[in-house]
Amino acid sequence: MSAAPLHQRLATEFRARIASGRWPEGEQAPSEALLCEEFGTSRGPVRQALATLRAEGLIVGGQGRSPIVRRNVPSHSASALGSFTAWAREQGREPGQRTTLQARVPATADIAERLQVDPGEPVLELRRVRTLDGTPALCETMYFVWALGRRLMEFDPDSGSVNRFLLDAGADLYASTHRIDAVAASAEDAAQLGLPEGAPLLRVRRTTTDAAGDVVEYSEDRYVPGVTTVIVENRLFAAPPANQPALRSVPVRRDA
């Protein structure tokens, strides 16, 4: 059996260092340059390994600086608004999915602007209904630049986590920005989620960039209220000045 790719072996080593306290919580991890020197490798595998830990919620930051190890991170943490599959299993729930569309499509003007590509350029569109313990929980719509989307044409989206497949394939999912608001269920949402048309839904729009700052994915998730709740709380890593009170904070998470 061939050895796992180097970036996966590095990610395993980095997780072990966090779990053992060798990389203390709330402190800076070694820089990419130092890790490259330690392991005698180029920046690519190190950057991919750190991107995996970032997607799992184990580290934050790193854009031009050393990443910081998250505080109070369970050993099998996942990015709260990243992997629905990982989060659900951490909660003792059974995630599921039903794919309604997986296709190469020309980018509309709106999607082209969000992905920073030319209108009409090919992108991958992926639509799924996600479930918790068999109950519809959200409608998920994702768009990927074609360089990433072509990899997903080899993936069965009914089989599990898109995030995990991409990270294991070495995709650079460096950072994401989330915008959260409320919308009314469309006719399609209502049919997929078993709700009346116009019912309120929690909408989370995510833009994912690679380490170079280029957009690689745009997604829109629409959650059923009462089935899942998104809680966003901030953590202050640097100690505040003596004359300023500290901010109370805990990691970001999803709660069912």
Image (cartoon, rainbow, N blue to C red):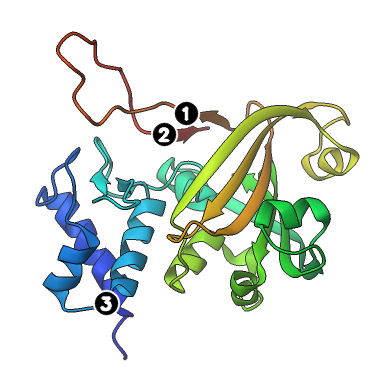
First in residue order: circle 1 vs circle 3:
3
Front residue of 175 and 86: 175
- Apparent side of residue 200 relative to residue 178 in the rendered image (left or right): right
Front residue of 2 and 45: 45
- Residue tagged 2: 252
In which image quadrant can residue 191 be found?
A: top right
Closer to the eye: label 3 or 2? 3
Where residue 141 sits: x, y (%)?
71, 52
First in residue order: circle 2 vs circle 1:
1
Q: Residue at 45% across / 66% down in the picture? A: 167
Quick one: SS at disc 3? loop
Classed neighbour count for the residue bearing mark 3: other residues with Cα under 10 Å, few (<14), some (14–19), many (≥20): few
Tags 1 and 3 touching, CB below 8 Å: no
Where residue 61 sits: x, y (%)?
33, 46
Task: Give the vertical position of 149 relative to 137 (above or below).
Answer: below
Classed neighbour count for the residue bearing mark 2: other residues with Cα under 10 Å, few (<14), some (14–19), many (≥20): some
- Apparent side of residue 126 relative to residue 213 in the rendered image (left or right): right
Where residue 7 sits: x, y (%)?
31, 73
- Residue tagged 1: 232
Front residue of 208 and 164: 208
Q: Amino acid at mark 2?
A: Val
Closer to the eye: label 1 or 3? 3
In this orientation, does residue 185 appear?
A: yes
- Apparent side of residue 195 relative to residue 43 in the rendered image (left or right): right
- Residue tagged 3: 42
Determine the CA span between mark 1 and mark 3: 35 Å
Tags 2 and 1 touching, CB below 8 Å: yes
In this orientation, does residue 134 appear?
A: no
Task: Give the vertical position of 64 relative to 230 (above or below).
Answer: below
- Apparent side of residue 9 relative to residue 92 in the rendered image (left or right): left
